[in-house]
Image: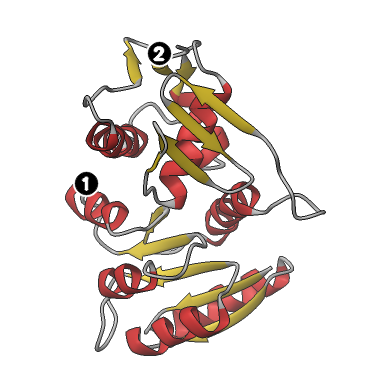
Amino acid sequence: MRVLVVEDDRRTAELVRDYLQGEGFTVTLAHRGSEGLAAILTDAPDVVVLDWMLPDLDGLQVCKRARESYAGPILMLTARDDEVDQIVGLEVGADDYLTKPVRPRLLVARLRALLRRTTSSPDGRDPERHEVADWVIDRGRRSVTVRGEVVDLTTAEFDLLWFLAEHAGSPVTRDQLFEELRGIPYDGLDRSMDMRVSQLRRRLVDAHPEGLDPICTVRGTGYQLVSG
């Protein structure tokens, strides 16, 4: 799998590159925002590791511009462990985030989890789809429609909705969500998954003609997608 690492700290970038190469990834480095954006749009890597703080264009600008044509997963690196920053990153199109200093094993686990969710079947076809109430979620096309109208979702939002759709009518725990979508166990404190669900809810409610919310909060457990 091809990974583009956009990181201005050359020592950090090289350490990440060496570790990822040892895990079987093919790695390309970029050290400026404009350089990283050009590489994303030209080479279409399988996954992007994108630092928040970059020269000329910061990570948010790169992510936002890349999302105009790039649909692959983007994992952002940030030195700031702030919920507002994380929400902003997710809203401009990032699929995941990781705080610095980079922990290589955790980075690899996150990248593999993202790639598992975005790699299609060997023959290039995946006819699986779920029809839940007014919603049609098609994993083969990675598309979502409500009453025939296309809903624009990020990669992370689609993957979250798909997982909930697979269990429509039944509650999904936070432990399940973290294991499936982040590749790590839930520590009981991390609220990032709740933020993702809130963001997805807003998009779905805004897209529905009647403003209906298809996701229910199951107190003390997690979330449930309506079954009909």
Q: How is the image coloured?
A: secondary structure
Q: Is residue 98 above or below residue 205?
A: below
Q: Earlier in the sequence, mark 2 or mark 1?
A: 1
Image coordinates for residue 184, horizontal then vertical, percent: 54, 39
Q: Image quadrant of residue 193? A: top left
In percent of width and height, residue 70 lies at: 46, 69
Q: Would you identify the image quadrant in which residue 26 lies? A: bottom right
Asked whether the beta carbons under mark 2 and mark 1 sit within 8 Å of each other, the answer is no
Place of residue 143 in the rendered image (x, y in percent of width and height, measured from the top left)? 50, 45
Which residue, as the protein is rendered here, is positioned at the far left? 84
Q: Quadrant of the N terminus?
A: bottom right
Q: Amino acid at mark 1?
A: Glu
Q: Position of residue 97 (x, y in %)?
A: 39, 55
**Is the residue 140 above or below the residue 219 in the image?**
below
At x 27%, y 87%, the residue is 55
Q: Which residue is mark 1?
A: 83
Q: Is residue 103 above or below residue 5?
A: above
Crowding at mark 2 (Cα within 10 Å: few <14, some 14-19, many 20+): few
